[in-house]
Image (spheres, helix red, strand yellow):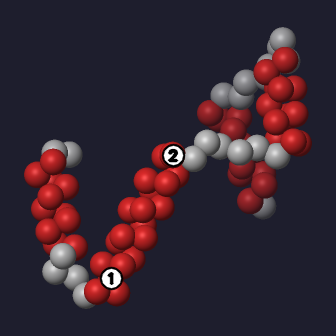
Amino acid sequence: MTKDDIRAVLDRVLSWPPWRQEDAVRLLSEMGAQDERAAVLTDAQAAEVERRLADSNPEFLTLDEVRGRFARQRK
């Protein structure tokens, strides 16, 4: 994607109805804010990350194993 591609899209946005332009502004503003925010974990989530990082013998699944587990959960 080039700057010209972005400009073309933004030019189209200017032709939209005002309510739709407001949606675009909110969406793009939220995307920008997400880039600035740091991820915040709960204490339980942080403890789980620490536990997993400390595991000297982590278990990894193959793609087929992951697919099998998801298939079983869908039943």
* Quadrant (top left/top right/bottom left/bottom right) for the C terminus: bottom right
Q: Which residue is mark 2?
A: 36
Query: Helix, strand or loop at disc 1?
Result: helix
Q: Is residue 12 left or right of residue 52?
A: left
Q: Residue at x 19, y 64 (%)?
A: 9
Disc number placed over residue 20 in the picture, else none: 1
Name which residue type carries label 2. Answer: Glu
Q: Amino acid at mark 1?
A: Arg
Instruction: Give residue 54's position: percent from left, percent from top.
Output: 84, 17
Q: Residue at x 49, y 46 (%)?
A: 35
Left or right relative to 3: residue 53? right
Point out residue 34 in the picture as x, y percentages from the top left corner.
52, 52
CA gap between label 2 and label 1 equals 25 Å
Which numbered mark, 2 or 1, is in the foreground of this view? 2
Mark 1: few/some/many CA within 10 Å (<14, 14-19, 20+): few
42 horizontally vs 66: left or right: right
Earlier-in-chain disc, 2 versus 1 = 1
Q: Residue at x 36, y 70 (%)?
A: 25
- Residue 5, relative to residue 17: is it above or below? above
In the image, is residue 48 above or below residue 2? above
Tell me residue 70's x, y (percent): 72, 49
